[in-house]
C-alpha cells in the first residue's frame, strides 16, 4: 500500500468527513481545543463545525491558530493524523476560513477541473 504522502489527498471540511472514511484527506481548520494529553485536538472549519483529530504521538509544541492536517478518516469520522502543520497568522490579515470553505465547495462541485484521483491508464 502506498504511503499517505504518496497518494492524492482530497481537501475536505467537517460536513464531508463521512464521505471519505478510510481515505487520505487534507483538513484545514482553526484550533478550538487541545486535549490535555496532547494526543488529540478539535478544529473548527469555515462553517464553524468541529472535527476531531487524533495523533499517534502527543503534540510537543504550542499549537494555536490555523492547522493543516494530513491523515485518514476513521469509521468514527475522526481524522487520524499522519502529519500536521500549524500556520502563523498575520493579525492584520487573518486566514479567511469561510472563503477557504467556499473554495472547497467549488472544488467539489466541479471535479472535472479539480481532479483528486490519479487514474491508472494501461
Image (spheres, rainbow, N blue to C red):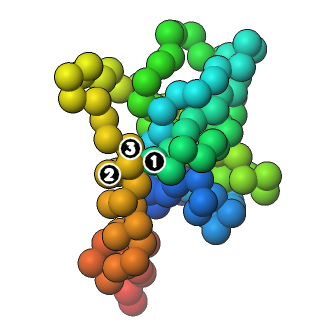
Neighbours of disc 2 within 10 Å: few (<14), some (14-19), many (20+): few
Relative depth, front residue between 3 and 17: 17
Neighbours of disc 3 within 10 Å: few (<14), some (14-19), many (20+): some
- Say whether disc 2 or disc 1 marks the residue closer to the N-terminus: 1
Q: Residue at x 65, y 28 (%)?
A: 41
Residue 33 pos. (x, y %):
63, 23
Q: Are marks 3 and 2 in contact (CB under 8 Å)?
A: yes
> 2 left or right of 8?
right
Q: Give the CA distance from mark 2 to mark 1.
A: 7 Å
Q: What residue sits right under mark 3 in the picture?
A: 97
Residue at the extreme bottom of the image, as rendered: 122
Residue 40 pos. (x, y %):
69, 27
Q: Give the CA distance from mark 3 to mark 2.
A: 5 Å
Q: Is residue 55 visible to the viewer in this orientation of the structure?
A: no
> Which dot marks residue 99?
2
Q: What residue sits right under mark 1 in the picture?
A: 46
Instruction: Name the secondary structure under disc 2.
Output: helix
- Say whether disc 3 or disc 1 marks the residue closer to the N-terminus: 1
Q: Residue at x 46, y 60 (%)?
A: 10
Q: Are marks 2 and 1 in contact (CB under 8 Å)?
A: yes
Q: Is residue 37 visible to the viewer in this orientation of the structure?
A: yes
Q: Residue at x 55, y 39 (%)?
A: 44
Q: Quadrant of residue 94?
A: top left
Q: Are marks 3 and 1 in contact (CB under 8 Å)?
A: yes
Instruction: Name the secondary structure under disc 3.
Output: helix
Q: Quadrant of residue 28?
A: top left
> 69 left or right of 78?
left
Amino acid at each position: 500500500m502506498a504511503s499517505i504522502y504518496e497518494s492524492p489527498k482530497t481537501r475536505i471540511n467537517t460536513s464531508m468527513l463521512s464521505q471519505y472514511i478510510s481515505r487520505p484527506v487534507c483538513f484545514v481548520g482553526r484550533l478550538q481545543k487541545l486535549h490535555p494529553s496532547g494526543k488529540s485536538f478539535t478544529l473548527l472549519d469555515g462553517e464553524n463545525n468541529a472535527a476531531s483529530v487524533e495523533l499517534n504521538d502527543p503534540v510537543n509544541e504550542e499549537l494555536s491558530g490555523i492547522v493543516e492536517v494530513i491523515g485518514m478518516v476513521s469509521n468514527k469520522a475522526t481524522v487520524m493524523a499522519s502529519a500536521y502543520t500549524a500556520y502563523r497568522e498575520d493579525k492584520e490579515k487573518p486566514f479567511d476560513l469561510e472563503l477557504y470553505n467556499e473554495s472547497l465547495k467549488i472544488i467539489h462541485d466541479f471535479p472535472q477541473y479539480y481532479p483528486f484521483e490519479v487514474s491508472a491508464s494501461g
